[in-house]
Each structure stands twice: as C-alpha cells, then as structure tokens.
Image (tube, grey):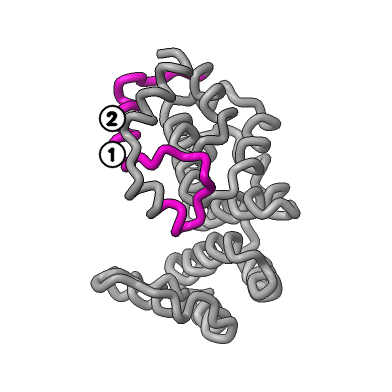
Amino acid sequence: MTLSETLTQLESLGSEKMREFNTKHGARSNQFGLKMGDIRTVAKKIKTDHALALELWKTENIDARLLATLIIKPAKLSKEELTEMVASEPYTQVADWLYSYVVKDYADNESLREGWMNSKNVMLARAGWSLTSGCVSRNPDRLNLPALLDRLEAEMPKAAREVQWTMNNTLANIGIHFPEHRSRAIEIGERLGIFRDYPVSKGCTSPFAPIWIREIVSRQV
C-alpha cells in the first residue's frame, strides 16, 4: 500500500466518538479516531513495511503513528532515528505502543537506556525509565538497586507526570521482585504519595506503589 492509500483507509475507519475520546485523554487534533482493533486489522493486511512505517510516522497523525509501530522493523532503525521517534511523540498512548513494539524489541536498547533516563526531553526520560523498569524484572544484575531507589526517592516528586508514571513502575517492580528492598520501596511510595488518589476501575489494581506491591506479592504466596 502507498502512503496515500493507507491514510485514506485509516480515515475511512475513524469516528467522531473516538476522536472525542482521544482528545479527552490528551490527543492532538491530527487524528482520525480509529479503534485499536481497527488499527491492528490494517496492520495485519500490510504485515511489515519499514519504508511505509517511516512515512506514516512523519505525518504526525496519531492513528498513522500507531499503525507505524506495528509494521516497522526495529532492527532497521539507527539509534539516532529511534531516539528522534521517541522524543517526537507527546501522546502517551502512541508512546506506549512505540515502547512495546519497537523500543522493547530494539537489540541495543541498553545502550540508550541511561542516556534517555537523564534526558531533559520528557518522552525520552519516560522511555528510559520504562526500559529501567523492564531491566529490574529481566536483567537486575545490570542495576544498582539501592542507588536506583535513592534516585527514585529524590527525583520522582519533581518529575513530569508522564515520567512519574514509568518511574513509579520501576519502584513497584523493585518492591515486587526483591523482598530485601520491599519495605523501602513501600516506604518511599507511602511518603511520596504519588498516584495515591489515582482513579481505578472496579476490579483493577491501583498504580499507587504500596498497594500495587502488596497486591501482586499476595498473589504469589
């Protein structure tokens, strides 16, 4: 499919209801308003098309960028290209898809992780902490967990809300996976109070780290 054909198809699947929903949750006006399932259906038709994905990303259209994350080849991206992509997308839903389908699968993401964590760009910092949260779960030997807790304690209160979210994931993961650090992770969460009052649907676990840690740990017993 060409870029024009793809954008035409995406536009035909959009709805005002979804555009309103997305806007309410922080999306910009450059969108068609597709349901996530419809984007996945289009992606299945295209399969993988790296060149098209790059063209879609350049449009800055939210739905086009979501589709791009599903059809791109992460291995073909340079570190500079990937960094630019992460830095350029302020809408968290697109950022999360970019992380899940591209950044997480990028072979050399460890070489980017710390630099992104220290970036003044909010979305790079957010992605850097996402990588760190994953590293806590999968490759903790790469990390100094006590020093990481020190940093979370000092930096979370003044971090941008978008970055607080992935920093909080890191805090919770430390508490969940490492009993020797659990009490301190819970204490940090209690004292900072970040996401304490976050609205949660019935049956879902609160993102407030102390509640989240205790809930997941209780399921492991």
Q: CA distance from mark 2 to mark 1?
A: 6 Å
Figure quadrant of residue 103 = top right
Q: Residue at x 52, y 45 (%)?
A: 29
Outermost residue, front side: 16
Q: Percent x, y for residue 78? A: 65, 26
Say if the magenta span includes residue 32.
Answer: yes
Spot the residue most to the left. Answer: 203
In the rendering, at what x and y percent does residue 194 appear? 54, 77
Where are the magenta residues, as a range?
Answer: 22-50
Instruction: Decide if residue 141 is in sight here.
Output: no
- Mark 1, other Cα within 10 Å: few <14 / some 14–19 / many ≥20: few
Residue position for label 2: 41
Q: Are marks 2 and 1 in contact (CB under 8 Å)?
A: yes
Where is the C terminus found, in terms of image quarters?
bottom left
Image quadrant containing the N terminus: top left
Element on which disc 2 rests: helix
